[in-house]
Amino acid sequence: MGKESVLLSGNVKLLLALLILQLCFAGFHIVSRLALNIGVSKIVYPVYRNIVALLLLGPSAYFLEKNERPPLTLPLLVQFFLLALLGYTANQGFYLLGLYYLSPTFASAMQNSVPAITFLMASALGVEKVNISRRDGMAKILGTIASIGGATVITLYKGPPLLHQTVQVQGSTTTEEVPRNEQNWTWGCIYLLGHCLSWASWMVFQAPVLKKYPAKLSLTSFTCLFGLIQFLVIAAIAETDFEKWKIVSGEEVFTILYAGIISSGVVIALQTWCIHKGGPVFVAVFQPLQTFLVAIMATLILHDQLYSGGIIGAILIMIGLYLVLWGKNREKREEYQSEPLKEPLIEEESKEKEDGEIQSDIP
């Protein structure tokens, strides 16, 4: 009974942590949309966000990994710069441009395609192996097709509205209105697709860099620093109006602090703990929950409209996500079963048990 209660308590903590994690992610979508609504510049916002994140991550990396950091070299600094270009500058820039034209719900739905896009890139570069003669290989291929197909549906087909509500913005805080026409819808989807592509490229490129420089917090801090520098260079060219840099309201302070502290600090620590306790596949399975939470929050707080095309595309993306995750999980189990064990009897019992688990995992 003691061991069972401890196990149950651990599972409850993990599920609660995953729920909080997805709430933090969902909150970031809403907070970023609010920042754009109140007039925060699309360039100033990530600059301030990355300053806050760097102030949070830098000291932590220095003290916690003081004896673990490998020596810095010029090739490593170049790779850190490229990681920042993909994972911070392009990633955050495309996201804000897409969010400017579309709702947080569809931004979150498009992000569900990142695992499939990452798998496609990794396979093309030879980082990920695919065996089309096995079920796990076919599942990953079909999942990738479904996810990319869902993103394409969202981009090309808007569909009729589902809620038939009139959006009214109360108060005088909103300084810019975006006309919701088909051209803006298409451009918003293209920007979000660029966001997903840059995010996936960052994850694929990050894997070999981590092997050379395994100090994760220090790596994150360096890429955040280079990302901040890159945004400052862009801001020096594109955002020369000093008035845009002024923080004049508590709402602006809140959105910047949330993005810097919660999205770049708490989320990293919480996600690392969840992956350590439950594994990356288990954590990734909860990703679509974020889209559901964002849809509820955006409808209640921002009075966003839902469109049938977005719902169809989101469902396809979620199906694709689960197929890719199931295929990856099945592949790992096949590799585990193929390893020789000392006791044949244990191997047979383990194989029967795992076969039963695999059947129960099929979506």
Image: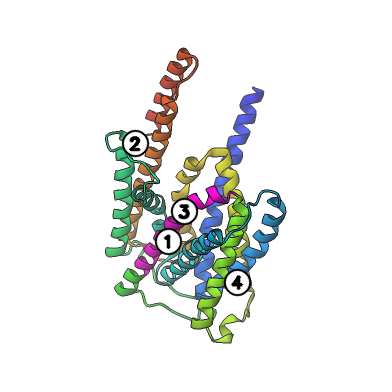
Residue at the right extreme?
Answer: 63
Answer with left or right where residue 95 lies relative to residue 156.
Answer: right
Q: Which of 289 and 225 is in front in this view?
A: 225
Give the secondary structure at mark 1.
helix
- The image quarter containing residue 179 is bottom left
**Could you tell which of marks 3 and 4 lies nearer the N-terminus?**
4
Label 2 or label 4, whichever comes before in sequence order: 4
Q: Is mark 2 on a helix, strand or loop?
A: helix
Residue on which disc 2 sits: 136
- Residue at 56% from the left image edge and 56% from the top image edge: 24
Which residue is at the front of the view, 183 or 235?
A: 235
192 drawn magenta? yes
The type of residue carrying mark 4 is Tyr
- In the rendered structure, which disc, 2 or 3, sits on the residue that comes first in sequence? 2
The numbered dot on residue 30 is none
Q: Which colour scheme is used?
A: rainbow
Seen at 41% across and 25% down, the residue is 338
Residue 122 at x, y = what percent? 38, 49
Q: Position of residue 89 (x, y in %)?
A: 49, 67
Q: How far apart are marks 3 and 1 (CA)?
A: 9 Å
| Magenta stretch, residue numbers | 188-214
Q: Are marks 2 and 4 in contact (CB under 8 Å)?
A: no
Alpha carbon separation for disc pair 2 and 4: 43 Å
The residue that label 1 is drawn on is: 198
Q: Give neighbour class at mark 3: few <14, some 14-19, many 20+ (Cα, 10 Å).
A: some
Query: What is the distance, in whole Å, between disc 3 and disc 4 at their CAs?
Result: 24 Å
| Alpha-carbon span between mark 4 and mark 1 | 21 Å
Q: Name the residue under label 3.
A: 203
